[in-house]
Image (cartoon, helix red, strand yellow):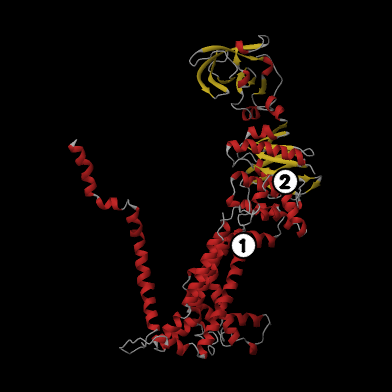
Amino acid sequence: MATLERDLRAPAAGRRFGFVLDRPEWLGPLMIAPAVLYIVAIVGLPFLLALYYSVSDISMGRRTLGFVGLKNFISVVPTSKFQTSLQNTFVFAIVSQVLVIILANILALALLKEFRGKWVVRLLLLLPWVAPISLGTIGWLWILDSIYSVINWTLEAFGLITADGWPMYLGKPYLAMGSVITVHVWRLLPLATVIILAGLTSIPKDIHDAAQVDGASFWRHHFQITVPLIRPILLVALLFGLVFAFTDMVVIFVLTRGGPYDTTQVLASLAFFTGIQGGDLAEGAAIAIFLFPLLLAVAFVFLRIARRSEVT
Amino acid sequence: MATVETRDVRKHFGDVHAVDGVNLTTKEGEFLVLLGPSGCGKTTLLRMIAGLEDPTGGEILIGGQVVNDLPPRARKIAMVFQSYALYPHMRVFDNIAFPLRAQGVPRAEIPHKVEWAAGLFGIEKLLHRKPRELSGGERQRVALARAVVREPAVFLLDEPLSNLDAKLRASARDELQQFQRRIGTTTIYVTHDQVEAMGLGDRIAVMQGGKVRQIGTPQEVYDEPADTFVAGFLGSPPMNLLEIPDCLVGFRPEHFLPKEAHESPDGLLALKFHISRIEYLGADRLLYGALEGKFPDTKVISKLASTVSTPVQPGKTQDFAVREKDFRFFDRETGLRTRPRPV
């Protein structure tokens, strides 16, 4: 009897760590710890730092760090440069997201069907997502170049424009905004399409069959059955895209650097030019986090709607 | 009101012949059941009638008109799916109203019609609920109401009772039949459940391997099976089959009784039955065992109603008998029915 007791106890003592992994209250935190650490170190700390910078008088080359309250915001927000950038940010984010959602819906519906060469289309579609974005954008820089543009070359070859009437895609205000939006849409389309495609494939086939038998036309079927059923996932795609469009500046930085005359300047790029290149870290930080409360609210509202409209 | 006819309808998926030349004609207002094991092509056939699948060959006629090229919405059919396929984001009212709106029924008429359809199935109180707030039986009624509401010419039902529990299924079967009799719409009903098929159908089309093996009333397919497949598929347990010199002879387990349990000793064929196991099922007992003597080691089953009082015991060999007129004869090669002959 005594030996039996010892046998049961001995391995337990020797492998205490092994049993820790069997307990959910330990295993869970252990598994999620790397992600938490990563987010705290890469996102959390810099974010807190930016928050503090925005209410300080820090600038490059100075050793002091004084608290100045909302002075940075008060001085930068009324400037016309900031106002233009704010307006551009909204135009850029909203127009590009509307286009992304419409195009991604069409693409996802097409990719749901079986057709020859589907894998080629899928591959091409995913290419902008897997290629490094700066590389892809540099490709676009050449495509939209004022001298070497293949678009203009092609248009001229077809006789649609003349040699002295080449559009300057990145040099004219509206064309420049159109160009950066186009490239941004091109870049975000794959992700949105894949997300929507996942939503579409999760709808049971019977539902579509029922709608067909019930006599729904294509549009009724799409807008009254399909779209409401993928609404939660559609909102997630839209949220991702919006946050991305509001905060990212790679496309604009590579293509136009905010020009011409700040017509494509957005808050993210303005923050970079002011804070990093201009050396005024405090004002740059203020610009960068200006939209944070708004984005937080947008994310909150979207996720709430998404949860409310979850079905089945 | 309309009839449905299929003429040599085929559906091939690559080398697989899911439906392989089916000829069927429903009668006006008939309840026709397509019965068969999984993969026999019954659902594919129904989906082709609905217009959800394109036939590889053959013609489908609804109300005398070839509908091969018509989309589902133009075929005046309504379909109830196994999963019910209710629209999960819509309330019951909007689910039932959906086909009406899709057909452009005037807005003012819709509430009236929805209430009528809901009234047929006693679900008026559920109209404001979402499908996820309903029980299985309630969902099934909503699906039926949605099918009825636009007064289709033909009903297509794809195993609508298979997601209900056994007790509910029996009452739903009863309601379904009464309802179909009342509105008198031609109905095609797919199932793999023979009890459902026997209980509901005016006629049953037994399918296997993409072909219709037999079509007839429940009595016909049960009492006069056209081949060994139908004989084995219908009836639980299936028909016993014995080999005699140039053919197969079959008899139902409930006709294979102890000798003294038969009403008269005339016209009986006596068989020695070695009982190996008895299953007590309440209303019946199933006796498993093998024949001795003339058909050594042929496994057979006897089904005794609880009213049969002859004592039976496992491990014993007893005198059993079958009336000669209960024998059915099948060709050994083709499995088809042949003329009777002495056993």
Q: Quadrant of the N terminus of chain A?
A: top left
* Residue A262 picture location, percent across and down: 53, 88
- Residue hosting label 2: B57
Vertical side of B235 occupied by B17: above or below: below
Front-most of B240 and B155? Answer: B155
Q: Looking at the image, is mark 1 or mark 2 nearer the viewer?
A: 1
* Real-space CA distance between mark 1 and mark 2, rounded to the nearest whole angstrom: 35 Å
* Residue A85 picture location, percent across and down: 52, 85
> How many C-alpha atoms fall within 10 Å of the one at disc 2: few (<14), some, or many (≥20)?
some
Furthest residue toward right = B64
Name which quarter of the figure residue A202 lies in.
bottom right
Front-most of B189 and A192? Answer: B189
Residue at position x 38%, y 73% in the image: A44
Tag 2 secondary structure: strand
Residue at position x 32%, y 56% in the image: A26
The numbered mark 1 sits on a residue in which chain? Answer: A
* Residue B30 picture location, percent across and down: 76, 37
Q: Is residue B78 visible?
A: no
Residue at position x 69%, y 40% in the image: B189
The numbered mark 2 sits on a residue in which chain? Answer: B
Furthest residue toward left = A2
Name which quarter of the figure residue B187 lies in.
top right
Q: Are marks 1 and 2 in contact (CB under 8 Å)?
A: no
Instruction: Using the image, tell me which numbered label, if any, was put on residue A227.
Output: 1
In the image, what residue type sits under mark 1?
Answer: Val
Residue at position x 36%, y 57% in the image: A28
Name which quarter of the figure residue A119 lies in.
bottom right
Q: Is residue B137 visible?
A: yes
Vertical side of A148 occupied by A126: above or below: above
In the image, what residue type sits under mark 2?
Answer: Gly
